[in-house]
Amino acid sequence: MGSTGVRIAIDAMGGDHAPNEIVAGAVRASEELGVKVLLVGDPQQIASALPPKTNLERVEIVPTEEAIAMDEEPLNAVRRKRKASINVAMDLVKQQQADAVFSAGHSGAAMASALLRLGRLPGVDRPAIGTVFPTVKAGKPVLILDVGANVDCRPKFLEQFAVVGSTYSKYVLGTDEPKVGLLNIGEEDTKGNELALRTHELLRANPHIQFIGNAEGRDVLSGEFDVIVCDGFVGNILLKFAEAVGGVILQILREELPQGLHGQIGTAILKPNLKRIKQRMDHAEHGGALLLGVSGVCLIGHGSSQAPSVFNAIRMAKEAVDNQVMQQLQSQYEILHNSSD
């Protein structure tokens, strides 16, 4: 599918700054990326958030009045509120009226809705949330999964994460031969708990991935790994910690720059470098996390997402569609099924 035909369904009511920031990021994406955005939610609120002179050929409002709040139990809310904005957005993908979906609302609700409406890819037991981290090697990100979808995991779940992660890394991030690591407390094959030890054996024996061994915490951002797998409990802690560290470093840089006239001159000279540092470290630059393993391209954003994050999440969704990541994942699992028969 050509890039001009990509359609992204947006849960316009999901997130702390919905719908204004969600709409602003989506409209920008429609203008700069050439995608069509389907804004799902309260039509009056969405219409009032649209910037003047919005190109309505690339922006469509899909009306629905219900939304799922952050404090609701996700599965019950998804089942009870059939016309909630996240459900309607997922239905657009299921009905092939959209090619991908994005929500910055309740992540549990987004996952539950995706599972109920889109279903899992054949051979996938548990979808995983994958997020892209910067590394010390410029232009060489690392994909971490799972970062929150599955708190308790079995070894085969982590093996599946490695397969979907490798496929995404190869076909969307452009890594020729993705190097896979297992997050662990030591490099040695014998380190870790029972889950780590059994997973290590499965990854080592899997011919469809390039498993290079355990990755310690200090290795996550080294650039030596392209994909790192872990359970959602550890992954979510890692994600939140990394985001906090990035924010702290950026704040320290701002505070430590010289003050006064000399400081203004120095800051002006350093501005391009500081901008590049922010782009490499700020989670907003990556937009969102992918829900890998469901039968559709699904991006989950931070609840605090503002327009730049929304724009970047839509860019990621477009890249996944353009690179036919769903077709690649399906073909990978067909290979796995055939080899296991």
Image (cartoon, rainbow, N blue to C red):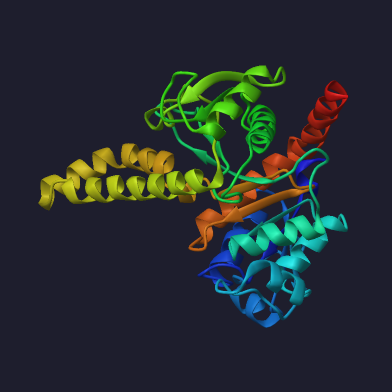
Where is residue 12 drawn, in percent x and y? 64, 68
Front-lying residue, 133 or 332: 332
Where is residue 17 drawn, in percent x and y? 51, 70
* Picture quadrant where residue 103 is located: bottom right
Please, is residue 16 above or below residue 110 in the view? below
* Residue lying at 56% horizontally and 34% vertically, measured from the top left: 195
* Picture quadrant where residue 275 is located: top left
Where is residue 288 drawn, in percent x and y? 56, 50
* Residue lying at 45% horizontally and 35% vertically, measured from the top left: 134
Where is residue 251 drawn, in percent x and y? 27, 51
* Residue lying at 78% horizontally and 74% vertically, measured from the top left: 82
Front-lying residue, 340 or 333: 340
Front-lying residue, 155 or 99: 155
What is the count of numbered marks? 0
Please, is residue 178 above or below residue 88 in the view? above
Q: Is residue 151 visible?
A: yes
